[in-house]
Each structure stands twice: as structure tokens, then as C-alpha cells.
Amino acid sequence: MKIALGQINPTVGDFSGNAGKIIEFSQRARGAGAGLILFPELSISGYPPRDLVERPSFQARNQQAAEQIAADTRGIAVICGLVTQASAETGKSAMNSAALLRDGKIDFIQSKMLLPTYDVFDEMRNFAPANSQQLFDFCGNRMALTICEDAWNDKHFWNRQLYRLDPVDELIKAGGNFVLNISASPFWVGKREFRREMLASIARNNRVPVVMVNQVGGNDSLIFDGSSIVLNPSGEVIARGKSFEEDLIYFDSSTLIGEIHEQTPGEEAEAYAALVLGTRDYVRKCGFSRVIVGLSGGIDSALTAVIAADALGPENVIGVGMPGPYSSHGSIADAATLAKNLGIRFELLSITETFESYRRALHGVFAGLPEDVTEENIQPRARGTLLMALANKFGAIVLSTGNKSELAVGYCTLYGDMVGGLAVISDVPKTMVYRISHHVNSQRPLIPQPTLEKPPSAELRPDQKDTDSLPPYEVLDPILEDYIEDMHSPEQIAHDRHLDLGLVKRVICMIDRNEYKRQQAAPGLKISAKAFGYGRRFPIAARYES
């Protein structure tokens, strides 16, 4: 039988829109001769719905949408994800489920057993786990239907299993010979290959085909890459969906021959594609169409503006240059050149007079005190006020431009360069900002060459360089990766990286004491294994020494 994977981009809570996509893709697949189509985890409600699932009306809308989809897709069987009601004795009101819609009705329900609580996941908060799962018969096979995490506990792949149960193993022991997995598996750089190898391990060790359909699109901080795949019993990919866009993929369940669609190659290219998709969906799903970016002439704001123009169209991006008393003529010129290259609107608003008026207002209070970081921070805060005023006036979202390296060590100003509705590159280390920017320019020379070549500087005092306060980013970023993503100790980092222990401890101290800033930052787009935000939960008031 011809089977289809409907790799769609749902919006959380948009039941009519999500159901419409499922019906449209199902009808297309039926027209192409498919007898079954699979859609991602919670595709009816969108993932992650978080505490919305606790509202009885939300659960009811899932049921109503599923019934409507079943009625409108006769002639093809449909598997899609939805929220169902949990039994009262579980203490939870909802379950994360998959429904088989066949012959105009809901024919079979399977609920998720493994509910992750690590990183960005907190499903035990919202859902009750299934006590058991069953097989269903289809096209001569005994189908093992699983939901995302249910397939992430294979003893042959993981050195340490997180859960006592392995739903895939149990379903195969019960006679399952075809594994179906509907997922909403968030992206991070390297995740596609990791996910493929994990699923290939299941296929090889159980000698069964494995099918995984994954959500695509951005929802809040999370980006879903799609990249749906089908593997034969040898673990070889026989069908594959595109990355970072909706897709419809077909394969034959008997011959195990399918379509291989092109995916985005390389770390820099996939990171860029993810950031574009995440920005587009965040802005549009929040009900906006326009964005504002402060252009300093530096690399971070340049990359943010390029992403925004690609995501939303240059006509929906306003770049704002805000030179101050220490801004170089080259930086102003680079900002203007970038705006011209992108074809975006560019406004130039000097903050020098505003800065001086603040100084005059504070002169009496600050009398006898030396100038320090206080005066430096007044400048980005003046810029932040202008950006937010423009956002209010034009009904736009400000995109903040700080990178992960700066956010990690607090090299950013609250209510200044941190203002905005979305922190586009807050999970991109500075060295990777340069790598992605060079990738962008290899496709189209958009970012001015001086921006790529000049030493990074906040330009808040004469001749300022980032290295006045921080180690070179080539040194800083590996420390951040080891500490934030891998939880290594200072001693281990110093030993492994051949660095001075005092330097490593100084960097880690900066990371720890700036937690209060990060918890006030705009939501950022996650592209690493461990991003700042609700996937990294550390206390603000603490005295723990790493």
C-alpha cells in the first residue's frame, strides 16, 4: 500500500487551521493513490500546547476537530495527534494521543506512555501516561503506533535508559512488525543525524521498518525541522522529507521504496534555515507582520537583519541606525550599506543629544563619582526606548540582536540592547555568528566586508573592544559549550581545553551571576542542545559555586 507522511506546520490552538491542513494533505494523498497518511504528534492542537490542555474547552475542540477530519477524509485512513481526556483516577485531565481515523469515524486511539520532563519538555505536568498500548492491523501488517518519546528508549542505542518501559520493544514482542512514530521533535544542530541513527538502531535490531513523521515550523522558542524519514529493516533511509518546510512524502509499505527529498546540508546552512523559519513563524503566529532591528554596523545586528528580511520579506523590516558619541563613521556606513543591500527601510536616529540630556539630569546625583559602566549603559537604554517607540507606532516587533556568548556572560544591558519581542540569535555563539554570516555571504554578498573583519565592539566608550572585558570568543565559546551544554566542571574544562583555571572560573562566575538578566530576556530561538530559556532552569538567588 502507498503510505504518505503529512509533514505540516500547525499553530498551537488553531483547530480550524490545523484541521484544514490535515484535510488538504489527506485529500492530496488520496488523489495520489495513498491508503494511509500520518501526521505529527498533537497535529490537531499544535505542539507544545502546555497548560492549554487543562482547559475542558481545549480538549473538546480536539475531539470535534478529529471528528470533522474523519468525516472529510473518507477514502483514506488518517493518523494524527490530538489531546484526549484522561480517566479521573490519574489526577491529570488530559492525554497525549494518536487517533486512527477510518471510514468517517475515530477507529482507534493510542496514547503516549513516555512523557519527557528534561530540557524543554514538561509533559508530566500536563498529561497522564498510558498504562498500555495495543497494535492495530492495516494493509497486512500489525502496526506499532508510537508517539515521539515512546521511541526514544531503545536499549541498543542508549547507554542509560531514562525509563523503565520501552513501548517499541513491548509492541514488537506483542507481534508488531511495522513501527509508526508521530513526532514533534524539536531541532538543534546535529539533531537530524542523531535522530536518524537512533531510529535506525530500532529498525536494525528488531528487523522492522520504522516510519517517523515530524512536525515542522516554529512555536515560541522551539523550531521543528520536519525531516521525516522511513527506514527499512536494515536501517537504511528509503524515504525522506524536506527540512524546515511543509512536505508530503510517499513510500510503498510492501516494496519499501519511497521518495527522497532534498534536505538542507551543513551546520551553518541548517542553523540559518532554522532561524529564518523560527523568526517567520514567531512573528506571524503572534499576529504581526513587521519587525524592527537596531543596526549598529556590527555582525550580530547584520545577521539578525538578514534573517528577518529572508523570513518576512524586506518590505516588512525596518532597520534603525542609532549612532552615539562613540560610534565610528565606519559603523554608520556599514549599517546603511547593509540596509541598502537587503532592500529594507533604514532610519538614522542619533542618541547623542538624548545621552547628554540624561547626563545633565543625573549630574547632581552623580557629583564627585567617576564615570563607569553606568554611563555606558545609558546609551543602549536610550536606543532601546527609541526602538520600542517605533514598534508601538508601526505595530511591529523589535528583534533583539544579542548572541549566546554575550547573554551567557551578561555582556548586554537590561532594558537596552536586550529589549524586544524575540531574541533571534540568542542561542548562537559569537563564533558561529561569524560562520553563519560567511555562509550567507557565500550565497549572496549582503553583509559588508568591514562588518565581517573589524574587531567586535559595543562602541560605548572610546576605542572599546569586546576583548577589553572578555576573553577572545575563540576561547570563550568552548568554555560556554562545555559548561552550559555538557555541565563540565571548571577543572575539567581547564584540563581538556588547556586553559588557565582562573580564567575558566572567572567566565563561569560571569555565567552564574547573570542568570537574573537571562530570565528577563526576550524569548530566543533554540538551535543548540541546551539553550537559555525554559529548557535551562537555574535559580537566580543562589550561592552555589561550580
Image (tube, rainbow, N blue to C red):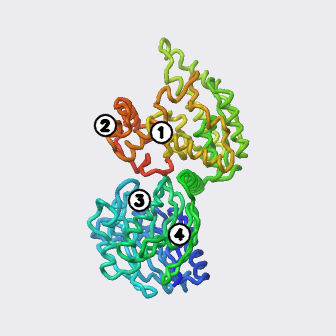
| Disc 3 versus disc 2: nearer the observer | 2
Tell me where residue 202 sits by quadrant: bottom left
Q: How many marks?
A: 4
In this picture, residue 263 sits left or right of residue 105: right
Q: Are marks 2 and 1 in contact (CB under 8 Å)?
A: no
User: Which numbered tag is attached to residue 43?
Assistant: none
Q: Nearer the viewer, residue 361 or 460?
A: 460
Residue annotated with mark 3: 51
Other-residue count near label 3 (Cα within 10 Å), few / some / many at <14 / 14–19 / ≥20: few
Instruction: Please say if 28 is above or below 473.
Output: below
**Residue 25 higher or lower than 439, as above or below:** below
| Residue highlighted by disc 1 | 405
Measured from the top left, where is residue 399 in percent x and y?
58, 44
- The quadrant the C terminus occupies is top left
Q: CA distance from mark 3 to mark 1?
A: 32 Å
Residue 322 shows in the view = yes
Q: Name the amino acid, label 3.
A: Asp
> Which residue matches tag 4?
240
**Three-letter amino acid code at disc 1?**
Ser
Judged from the image, the secondary structure of the residue bearing numbered disc 1 is: helix
| Disc 3 element | helix
Q: Is residue 44 visible?
A: no
Image: 79 above or below 536? below
Residue kind at label 2, given as amino acid type:
Glu
Which residue is at the front of the view, 411 or 489? 489
Q: Nearer the viewer, mark 4 or mark 3?
A: 4
